[in-house]
Image (spheres, grey):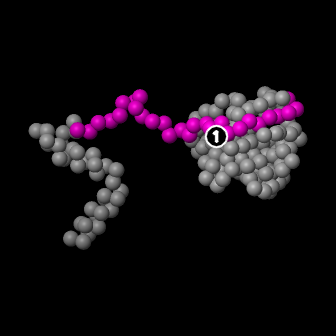
Amino acid sequence: MKKVVVLLFVGLLLFGSMVPKLIAIFSSSDSEAGSVSSISTPAPSAVVSNEPAFKKEGELTFPKIQKKISIEIADNDAETTQGLMYRKSMPDTCGMLFVFPDSQERSFWMKNTYIPLDLLFINSNKEIITIQPNRPPFSEEAIPSYKPAQYVLEVNAGFCQRNGIKQGDKISF
C-alpha cells in the first residue's frame, strides 16, 4: 500500500500540471465517458510571448561618429544574468549596457541569446578596449574582455563595422 501511495505522490508531482485537465476530463457531466469537450486551448492570437520587451533607460553616444543609440541598462545581478537572453530581435538603434561596480577582466557568453551580437568591452574611462564582433547565438563559448572592463555594451552583430566603431573610441552616457 505504501508503494502505491508513494507512486501516486511522485506521479502527481511529475504530472501536476496535467491534474486539472485530467480532473476535467473524468469529472465531465457529458454522457460520453472521457469527453474532452470541457478542455479548451487558447487561440493562437491569445498566446502570450515570454520575450522580454526592450526598456529604454538612457542614451549612449559615440562622440567620434556622432551616433546615439537607446540603451537598456543592466546594473544588478538579476539584470546582468538575464541580459538579452530570450529576445528574438532588437532594433539597430538600441543596445544593452552592462554597468559593473568595478573594473576587471570580464567574460560573457551567448547562452539562450537568439540575436547575433557585437560585444564592446569598455574601461572605467569609457574607452572601448575590446570589440568581440559577430558573436553567434546560443554559444556557451567564453567571450573575454582581455583587459579590465567596467562596462560592456551589446549591440546587433555588424553594428561596429557598419558604423566605423573601433577599439580606442570613447562612449558617453
Left or right: residue 29 compared with residue 163: left
The answer to whether 100 appears left or right of 76 in the picture is right
Q: Residues within 10 Å of mark 1 (few under 14, many from 20)?
A: some
Q: Quadrant of residue 64?
A: top right
Find residue 156 and report its horizontal and vertical position in percent: 70, 34
| Three-letter code for the amino acid on which mark 1 is drawn | Pro
Residue at (48% x, 36% y) in the render: 49
Q: Is residue 63 above or below residue 4?
A: above
Residue pictured at 10% horizontal, 38% vertical? 31
Could you tell me which quadrant the N terminus lies in? bottom left
Asked whether residue 136 is in view, the answer is no
Q: Which residue is mark 1?
A: 137
Q: Is residue 81 above or below residue 30?
A: below
Q: Is residue 54 visible?
A: yes
On the image, the x and y values in percent for residue 165 come to 83, 34
Q: Between 82 and 173, which is closer to the camera in this rendering?
A: 173
Q: Is residue 40 magenta?
A: yes
User: Which part of the image, by quadrant, shows the C terminus?
Assistant: top right
At 40% from the left and 32% from the top, the residue drawn is 46
What residue lies at 85% left-to-right and 29% top-to-bottom? 65
Near-viewer residue (70 or 106): 70
Q: Is residue 96 left or right of residue 26?
A: right
Q: Which residues are magenta?
A: 38-65
Q: Secondary structure at mark 1?
A: loop
